[in-house]
Amino acid sequence: MAAEDAHDDAEGGNEGDKPKKSKPKVLILVIVGVVVLALVAGGSFFAASMMGGKKKDAKESKEEPKEEKKEEKKAEGGEGGKEGKNGNFVSLEPIIVNLSAEEGKRYLKITMQLELTRPEGVAEVNEKMPQIKDAVITVLSSKSAEEVLTVDGKFKLKEQLMTRVNSTLANSAVKNVFFVEFVIQ
């Protein structure tokens, strides 16, 4: 028997082979486990960073409207108008009008700001807002899409709007008209 044991030890025997075969299997399992853990950790980090970015953007977007509302309130004359180096500004609410067109219906949605020559004009503009909106709607609805789509057409439209709005004001004047939104459909 001693010869058989020596012979088994020399050949490696069945008992010696099992631990050698199980070591590579264990090593492979450990490597696969480490790779899976790395992928899960990387995926978790990526997901957390994406969610963190969305939460940050959501916080920023919640803060921006508050600031915009304050600026709009000032611009509408709620706190004496928004004074700048070039004068005071008054924002008009968005206006939607039908454009004059022979074929089909065309709409214009416009939001604009009026730059006034005098700070005291903000109060007057707010008092006469119905007349100003009527003047703006009258001018806009008389235009066709082709007239206001070009750059020159927009400049002419600004001039006409200034003239019409200034005709409604007594103590101040509109120095400039700024289109904040201009959409034709």
Image (spheres, helix red, strand yellow):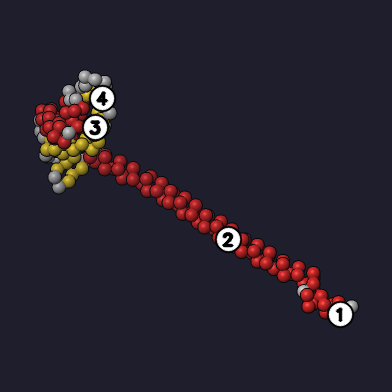
Q: Pick out the residue farthest to the top.
A: 102
Measured from the top left, where is residue 151 in percent x and y? 16, 36
Q: In the rendered view of the protein, which quadrant contains the C terminus? A: top left
Q: CA distance from mark 2 to mark 4?
A: 61 Å
Q: CA distance from mark 4 to mark 3?
A: 13 Å
The residue carrying mark 3 is 110
Q: Amino acid at mark 2?
A: Val
Whole-angstrom CA distance, mark 3 to mark 1, is 104 Å
Q: Earlier along the polypeptide chain: callout 2 or callout 3?
A: 2
Q: Position of residue 26 (x, y in %)?
A: 68, 65
Q: Can the viewer see residue 138? A: no
Q: Secondary structure at mark 2?
A: helix
Residue, x 72% and y 67% (percent of image)?
A: 21
Q: Nearer the viewer, mark 1 or mark 4?
A: 1
Foreground tag (4 vs 3)? 4
Residue 19, percent across and down? 74, 69
